[in-house]
């Protein structure tokens, strides 16, 4: 019989031992039990770090997908399963913060490009070409994405204001912005070399 930790009920230690055996073996019920036991903690950590419930939900899903995919790497002798899951959560939260920074940089660079496209008659042939290319790529975007970028960069509205004006959910506005900027970056990224 294994020693019981004084701070944990005997049933919890037994459950932890079962999870430590079942999860690496590919037992779906063990994953469900781990999710039931630690998902609220993971979500709370993500929510506190990211300040956004939707992103916290995404991170929570990514964490437990990572738990499932990395289940063979779990070693009980290195620490408790809860600590292992929190470690995965911290890495996913850090990834989400990095992605947010990259999106912000993309928004700034796209905003600068859109502002440049809006200024006629600079006399610089490369600037004129940039304006033509940007306007052409904007026209190729799906209408909702084009509308969101127009409101953001030409009317200087925040994403919350865009959601209010269009009646779209804020998450949809964010998704349209992210997808549109990603498309523009992909299409325009290789068009000029200096």
Image (tube, helix red, strand yellow):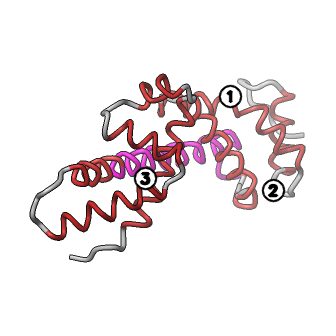
- Looking at marks 1 and 2 on the same chain, the residue that comes earlier in the sequence is marked by 2
Q: Tell which residue pokes out farthest to the left in this image.
A: 123
Task: List x then y, in percent, for residue 77.
Answer: 70, 52
Task: List x then y, in percent, for residue 39.
Answer: 70, 33
Comparing 181 with 63, the one in front is 181
What residue is disc 1 on?
A: 40
Q: Residues within 10 Å of mark 2 (few under 14, many from 20)?
A: some
What residue is disc 3 on?
A: 181
Which type of secondary structure does the marked residue at label 1 adopt? helix
Q: Which residues are magenta?
A: 77-106
Measuring 44% from the left and 29% from the top, which residue is drawn there? 162
Q: Nearer the viewer, mark 1 or mark 2?
A: 1
Task: List x then y, in percent, for residue 164.
Answer: 48, 22
Task: List x then y, in percent, for residue 56.
Answer: 58, 34
Measuring 43% from the left and 32% from the top, which residue is drawn there? 159
What residue is disc 2 on?
A: 24
């Amino acid at each position: 019989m294994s020693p019981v930790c004084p701070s944990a009920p005997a049933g919890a230690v037994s459950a932890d031992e079962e999870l430590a055996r079942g999860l690496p073996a590919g037992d779906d019920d063990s994953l469900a039990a781990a999710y039931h036991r630690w998902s609220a903690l993971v979500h709370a950590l993500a929510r506190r770090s990211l300040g956004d419930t939707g992103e916290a939900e995404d991170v929570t899903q990514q964490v437990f997908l990572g738990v499932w995919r990395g289940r063979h790497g779990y070693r009980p002798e290195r620490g408790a399963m809860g600590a292992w899951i929190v470690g995965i959560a911290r890495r996913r939260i850090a990834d989400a913060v990095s992605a947010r920074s990259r999106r912000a940089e993309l928004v700034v660079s796209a905003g600068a490009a859109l502002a440049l496209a809006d200024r006629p008659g600079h006399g610089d042939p490369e600037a004129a070409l940039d304006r033509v290319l940007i306007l052409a790529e904007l026209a190729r975007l799906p209408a909702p994405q084009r509308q969101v970028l127009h409101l953001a960069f030409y009317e200087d509205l925040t994403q919350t204001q865009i959601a209010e004006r269009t009646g779209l959910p804020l998450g949809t506005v964010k998704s349209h912005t992210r997808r549109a900027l990603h498309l523009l970056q992909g299409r325009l990224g290789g068009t000029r070399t200096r």
